[in-house]
Amino acid sequence: MFITTGCNSLKIEKPLDKTAIKRKINTLLTNWHKAAAEANFDNYFGVLDSVSIYIGTAGEENWTKEEFANFSKPYFDRGKAWSFTTLERNIYVNKDGDFVWFDELLNTWMGTCRGSGVLEKTSNSWKIKHYVLSVVIPNNDIQKVIEAKKKNDSVFLKKFDK
């Protein structure tokens, strides 16, 4: 514990408990994925910050919260969104304890995926600012995947031709 003094003030600062922050973020992310599996739209999108970005597995999937919510709403309304089970998760905390980043390995309907993201503590709650979902491709399979997506990639990349 640190005690700092000024002219007429006494401020006691507790050391940062990164382990507690990591536990809190781990629970938040587990519950976030659970909300999708249970098609709980409010709980799922309530964790995303108003300015958050969600990047999906397809090249064109770079969504604001509103765009992602609009895309996802029909799935949630049918009572069947998606189910991601965490296999492994690493969480990192900045020195002030108000900013974290993470990566996670997931078991999904697409097979093994990797998620990564950034959260920020605002007031007394944590919000996801940025999330990236990618499909994991074993190195031995990459040539087959490259060949399988060649045609669609060429169509997609035309929008970047100048």
Image: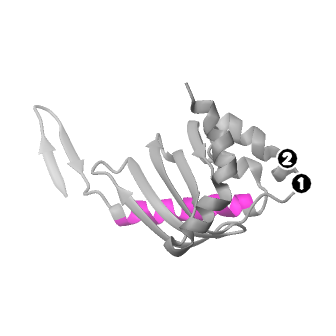
**Residue 120 x/y as whole percent:** 45, 44
- Magenta span covers which residues? 19-36
| Residue labelled with disc 2 | 74
Q: Amino acid at mark 2?
A: Pro
With 129 as the anchor, is 151 left or right in this view? right
With 128 as the anchor, is 75 left or right in this view? right
Corner quadrant of residue 36: bottom right
Q: Residue at x 69, y 41 (%)?
A: 68
Q: Disc 1 on helix, strand or loop? A: loop
Q: How many residues crowd around disc 2 within 10 Å: few (fewer than 14), some, or many (20 or more)?
A: few
Point out the image quarter for the N terminus. bottom left
Q: Disc 2 on helix, strand or loop? A: helix
Residue farthest top in this picture = 162
The circle drawn on residue 94 is none
**Tag 2 near tag 1, CB within 8 Å:** yes
Q: Residue at x 74, y 63 (%)?
A: 37
Residue 148 is one of the magenta-drawn residues: no
Point out the image quarter for the C terminus. top right
Q: Nearer the viewer, residue 56 or 72?
A: 56
Q: Is residue 22 above or below residue 11?
A: below
**Residue 109 x/y as whole percent:** 72, 68
| Residue labelled with disc 1 | 78
Q: Amino acid at mark 1?
A: Arg
Residue farthest right in this picture = 78
Residue 35 is one of the magenta-drawn residues: yes
